[in-house]
């Protein structure tokens, strides 16, 4: 993705391209803050190039995607050891539909509906959790090829591997995604989420159980900083009980419906309006099947008051 061509006119990488870089970096790292740092580092490397060298690069955007991906590759290497020491379950930092760099923002001139659907799916918490199980090389090959459409030869420039090796990495990653349970875009999700919101807000155990799939599962990320289950909880009654415990611990809790990583979601706020939990929901067949609950306050900073 170097895109070098002698004599090419210098083109400045603009804000529209920056959203692409953020989209790549977030999917690779699962953290908005780390993605922003990676993009900033890529910009620093770009402007550190001699003017003459920058002027010879035919595609600054392709050069920047390569730079961001290489920065992320380095971060992923150290992140794997940090994940081992992480307290409890690790979930990606939740992203709202208001995030300017996502396809959810509805920016004029954005991706067409088919492309947006693919981008949304790759942003979902379900897929992001699967990405976390991949090796750094698999993750980069999958994100760059399957999500953003880069060629394996270009990906090889990032990973230092042959196009054939990159193709195998992407195929292995694709199998992981295909074999994992994935949310469905079923109609009628909004009424289910609204009913679920009302039942949780009122502390109605029976209504919560009725709205949960019998095999429902909740995964909570507290990062060791707040009270949170350190392992997944399964079964409608156990999940409902856990949600009511959250309700008890947050007197005056207010719930608002939102979009969380392209999935239906809820934001639980305390009396001061601070986000105490952000929940992504997988809804299918009229019931909530899976919940991903972010409680780690370090991952809720973008959700404000």
Image (cartoon, rainbow, N blue to C red):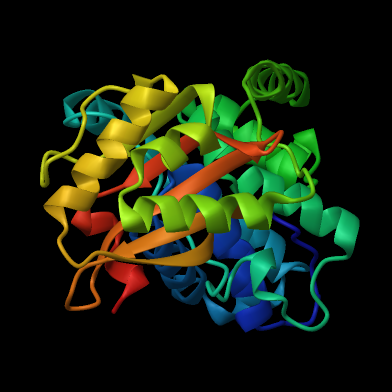
Q: Quadrant of the C terminus?
A: bottom left
Residue 89 placed where, x, y %? 29, 30
Decide which of 171, 52 is in the foreground and name it: 171
Q: How many marks?
A: 0
What residue is at 22 percent from the left and 32 percent from the top? 82
What residue is at 54 percent from the left and 53 percent from the top? 195
Relative to residue 64, is residue 9 drawn left or right? right
Task: Tell me if I can see residue 222 in this picture.
Answer: no
What residue is at 62 percent from the left and 40 percent from the top? 283
Q: Please say if 76 is above or below 215.
A: below
Residue 254 placed where, x, y %? 31, 68
Q: Please say if 248 is above or below 258.
A: above
Decide which of 131, 17 is in the foreground and name it: 131
Q: Please say if 132 is above or below 45.
A: above
Task: Tell me if I can see residue 56 in this picture.
Answer: yes
Decide which of 131, 302 is in the foreground and name it: 302
Choose top left, top right, bottom left or bottom right for residue 163.
top right
Residue 199 placed where, x, y %? 42, 51
What residue is at 72 percent from the left and 80 percent from the top? 107
């Amino acid at each position: 993705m170097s895109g070098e061509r002698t004599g090419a006119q210098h083109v400045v990488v603009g804000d529209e391209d920056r959203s692409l870089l953020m989209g790549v970096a977030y999917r690779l790292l699962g953290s908005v803050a780390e993605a922003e740092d990676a993009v900033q580092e890529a910009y620093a490397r770009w402007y550190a190039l001699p003017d003459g060298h920058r002027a010879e690069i035919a595609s600054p955007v392709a050069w920047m995607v390569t730079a961001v991906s290489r920065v992320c590759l380095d971060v992923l290497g150290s992140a794997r050891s940090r994940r081992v020491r992480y307290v409890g379950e690790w979930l990606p930092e939740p992203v709202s539909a208001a995030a300017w760099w996502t396809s959810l923002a509805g920016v004029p001139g954005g991706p067409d509906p088919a492309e947006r659907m693919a981008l949304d799916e790759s942003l979902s918490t379900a897929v992001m959790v699967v990405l976390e199980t991949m090796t750094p090389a698999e993750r980069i090959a999958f994100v760059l090829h399957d999500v953003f459409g880069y060629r394996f030869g270009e990906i090889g420039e990032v990973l230092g591997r042959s196009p054939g090796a990159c193709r195998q990495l992407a195929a292995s990653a694709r199998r992981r995604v295909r074999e994992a349970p994935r949310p469905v875009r079923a109609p009628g999700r909004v009424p289910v989420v609204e009913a679920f919101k009302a039942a949780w807000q009122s502390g109605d155990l029976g209504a919560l159980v009725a709205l949960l799939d019998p095999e429902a599962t909740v995964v909570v990320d507290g990062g060791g900083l707040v009270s949170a289950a350190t392992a997944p909880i399964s079964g409608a009654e156990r999940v409902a009980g856990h949600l009511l415990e959250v309700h008890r611990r947050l007197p005056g809790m207010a719930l608002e419906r939102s979009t969380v990583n392209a999935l239906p979601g809820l934001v639980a706020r305390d009396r001061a309006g601070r986000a105490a939990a952000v929940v992504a929901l997988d809804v299918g067949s009229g019931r909530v099947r899976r919940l991903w609950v972010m409680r780690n306050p370090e991952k809720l900073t973008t959700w404000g008051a």
